Amino acid sequence: MKTNRMKITVTPDTRVAEIYSSPNAVTPEIGPCGGLSLTYYSMCDYMNVQPISEVSWQIEYILAGTDCKEFDYGFFFKKDRLITGDARPLMAALAINSWFTSFIIKGIKLTNECIGSIISLLQQSTSFEKVVLNGIGMDRSACEKLIDAIVGNKTLPLKELDLGNNQIEDKGMIAIADMLKNMQFPLTSLILGGCSVGRSAMSSLGDALGVSESAIQHLRYLDIGGNKLESEGSSAISNFLVKSKRSKTRSTAIESIINLIEKKSRTYNAIKTLVLQGGSKSQLKGDLLPIICSLFYNSTLKELDISGHSIGDVGAAALGKLLQSNFALEKLEWDDNSTTLYGLNLFKVGLSRNNTLSNMPIPMRDIAAHVKSDAQSITRISDLVGEIQQILLDNTTKSATAAAAASASTTPRHSVSSGTLSPTKSRTSSTPPFTIDPKTTTATCAGLTSYNIINDSELVEPLANLVVK
């Protein structure tokens, strides 16, 4: 379809200003959504592509009169339409449109030609703050081109990026990591789950996030689930999480670390020492709870350091329950977690049912802070510390005795049968047996977070009967 186009040149430039400032000048009606429908038809004419009437109808009769700033591709998508070259005019129209601030495509498999049009769109857009290209069939080559387009467009105000469920593989992820290292825009959300990425590229991603000041300051949501973290990637991502000051939703990254710790992961490693020290600017707080719960049935970890995260009494409760089911842990450091007398009571209940933990510095910072706020509790807290120290001393003695004795003549202190772990000789005869809950880590943690704070005088073996729903 050929058309005749006429170009009018007005000189000097002052005459142009006079024309538009004239009271007889007519302001054109551009239409809804910043004139997207008119621009779309113009681009179809320019590219010699047959317009799709449904596109303009949706704009003029559905979006017109609304304040919708989100361009959802699925809203316009029809079977076998807008997935190939016929999408080019629409992408070109969006490239010069400033009405929409979000561009979203989810679960629609596009051709390489259509993905190329999207890349061209992102090269020119000056309004998209959110870009979602989830499950569109993008491969590693297209991902590299997409990242180049984003990096090259200095006017793109990008804040949220979702490239999940695309087979971008290691090369695509490395391109994303390179972008993050020198990222100038304040990215707050990054979704890269299910991208078939290996441990080397995931490690590169973690390293890039760790050195990116923009990511450390602004990133709030990170989804990297469904990729192969393993030990290298988990370590790199953990280092970033420690540095992050603004991250609010880290559940997926933490879940990936948990999968490495728990035996249900096929890439399971027999981790012996786990150090997750916090600080005044790097506290995990409640995000630490799922990691503690993931160690409930771990049989390889010997040393654990989770000090400095201000998790509160719920963390002490989780540790107490951990010690009732984990009989491999030998060393524990957990000071500076805002633990009160109530939390120490919960911890002591679990410790009294454990015979392996023997090396544990008393959390003196938390004790000092509690005594400062409640001086009347000094006698009770002194007695409680003495009881905890005695249990640790008993465990040390028993460990030494067991090591010296022949294994054939040593009777196991604990026996496991039908999912129930029962001490052969409990320190408290009235204590009911602890039942291993087969629920998942998430459900277990949900039970811990829902426990009710009660008066210290009413404390009656709370961990033994803690309901997990």
Image: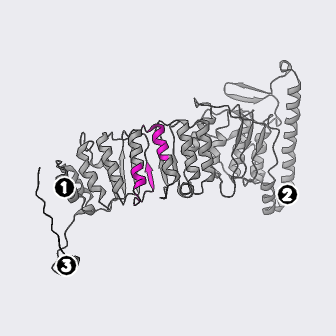
Closest to the camera, between mark 3 and mark 2, is 3
Looking at the image, which residue is at 38% across and 42% down? Answer: 142
Label 2 sits on residue: 378
Disc 2, SS: helix
Disc 3, SS: helix
Label 1 sits on residue: 41
195 shown above or below 159: above
Which sits in the foreground, 351 or 180? Answer: 180
Identified by mark 3, the residue type is Arg
The disc label shown at residue 53, or none: none
Residue 357 falls left or right of residue 142: right
Looking at the image, which residue is at 33% across and 39% down? Answer: 109
Q: Magenta stretch: give its range.
A: 148-176
In the rendered image, residue 155 lying in the magenta stretch gets the answer yes
Label 3 sits on residue: 15
Quarter of the figure that contains the C terminus: top right
Q: What whole-number distance in Å separates the C-alpha atoms at marks 3 and 2?
A: 87 Å
Q: Is residue 208 visible?
A: yes
Q: What whole-number distance in Å separates the C-alpha atoms at marks 1 and 3?
A: 30 Å
Q: What whole-number distance in Å separates the C-alpha atoms at marks 2 and 1?
A: 79 Å
